[in-house]
Image (cartoon, rainbow, N blue to C red):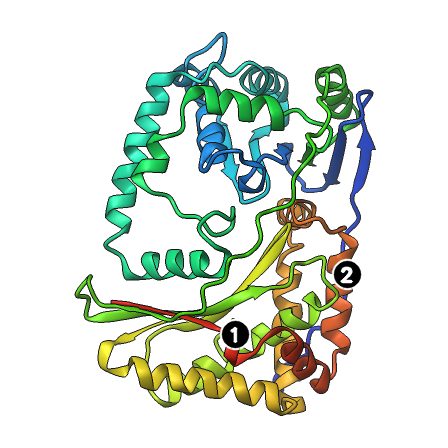
Amino acid sequence: MNNNKPRIYSPSAFIIPEYRMIQLSNGLKVYIFKGGESDTLKLEWCFKAGRSTESKQLVSKSCNSLIKEGSKYSSGYEISEYFDYYGSALTHNAGVDYNSYSFYCLGKYFDPLLEKFLEVMLYPSFPEDELNTIQTNSISRLKQDMDDADFNSYRILTEKIFGSNHPYGYNSTEQNIRSVGTSDILSHWHLNYQTTDSFIIVAGNVTNTILQKIEDNFGHIGLKKTPTRTDLKDIERDMRPIKSFKLEKTQSSVKIGIDCVSRQHDDFDGMFVFNTVLGGYFNSRLNNVIREAKGLTYNIFSTHDTYLYGGLFYISADTSQDQVIKMNTEIYTQIDKLLDKPIPKAELERVRGYLLGTLMTSFDGVYNCVETLRSCLVEGVDFASVQQLINKIATIETTEVMETGRRNLSIDNLIEVVIG
């Protein structure tokens, strides 16, 4: 009997799967990921119609939510029941830069579902009564969320970093929810949907027959020229710290952050590693020192959110009101240490293993692969950038992590919000 423990191997750089891209007769791009043993499919149509394209605040989300609530030929209820009959559902996603609609299905039901999908996408009726219902529900959820300290601290942080008029910074209010009318929605839809910069992603058991059906159904659609985009409003950063305890919570929510690079920037890969070392996983410095060693919080993390036109770096934690100053001081201490000295090689190797292992799961199955591809496309980078990130993680040196952090973060520029 062999009682020897199996050897543990650290993850190493790996080659990402390949996809295929075709253009239909009308120029519409279709990204294809084949795979999976079952006869299932996912189709998603993505439109550059998010917040960054708005002429009026919240019109993007309102438009995307209302599309599925009725078409020229079917009510919202009938559309929902139709997809449900075939064991599917019509799913929508509203992002800061891109909106999309998608559905999963068995291959044998692709034809009827694609027909209904196109009916919904090409002939939405935008019923006003459904818009009123959506707005009423949104206001109700907003009122509930406004009692949550974490929700409030994030809203305030993004507004202070980007500004109340910036698409990445403005917040929902009862007034701007109600101000969106069906005429605003129709105008947004006409300008930003079925344009030349929209694209389709199809994944699963994608046969030549399926591709021909996509050509037959989408290839004849007259795509509108992408509207000329004006530059986003300048960031109106407000550096003044905010401390408010009006909610009378026993725990205060702390957010500390600043605008940061997008995935298109040369420093993104290095910041990806830097963020992980600081607070991006359970064994991070913030978690080890502030949560585990000092017991100042039950949960603390840092994150680097990226968008098409920028990014956001922030630290989030909850603690009791009397520990806020102590915890924040320690947060700044840990940032300063990471910016001042290269991290030990053993720590970097641990982070390497964690990140490479995590990225491997992004390619575990065809539908994870296609989500990874989608995230690249909507943020303006090629799928090959993921391979570049993997290679950087495998080879980055300790000094490079520190230097990348220095170029993009300064304690003096961080904005602090405390809500309790």
Q: Where residue 120 appears, x then y in whole percent? A: 53, 18
The residue singled out by tag 1 in the image is: 413
* Label placed on residue 321: none
- The answer to whether residue 314 of the structure is visible from this angle is no
Front-lying residue, 168 or 297: 168
N-terminal label among 2 and 1: 2
Residue 389 image point, x, y percent:
73, 65
In the picture, the quarter occupied by the N terminus is bottom right
Report the front residue among 159 and 147. 159
Left or right, 363 with respect to 96, comes to right
Q: Are marks 2 and 1 in contact (CB under 8 Å)?
A: no
> 219 or 357: nearer the eye?
219
Classify 353 as above or below 98.
below
Q: Position of residue 372 (x, y in %)?
A: 65, 51
Q: Is residue 282 above or below residue 340?
A: above
Q: Residue at x 25, y 39 (%)?
A: 140
> Which residue is farthest top?
73
Q: Secondary structure at mark 2?
A: helix
* Local SS, label 1: helix
Eye-nearest disc, 2 or 1: 1
Question: CA separation, marks 2 and 1?
Answer: 32 Å
What residue sits right under mark 2 in the picture?
A: 387
Which residue occupies 69% across, 47% down? 373
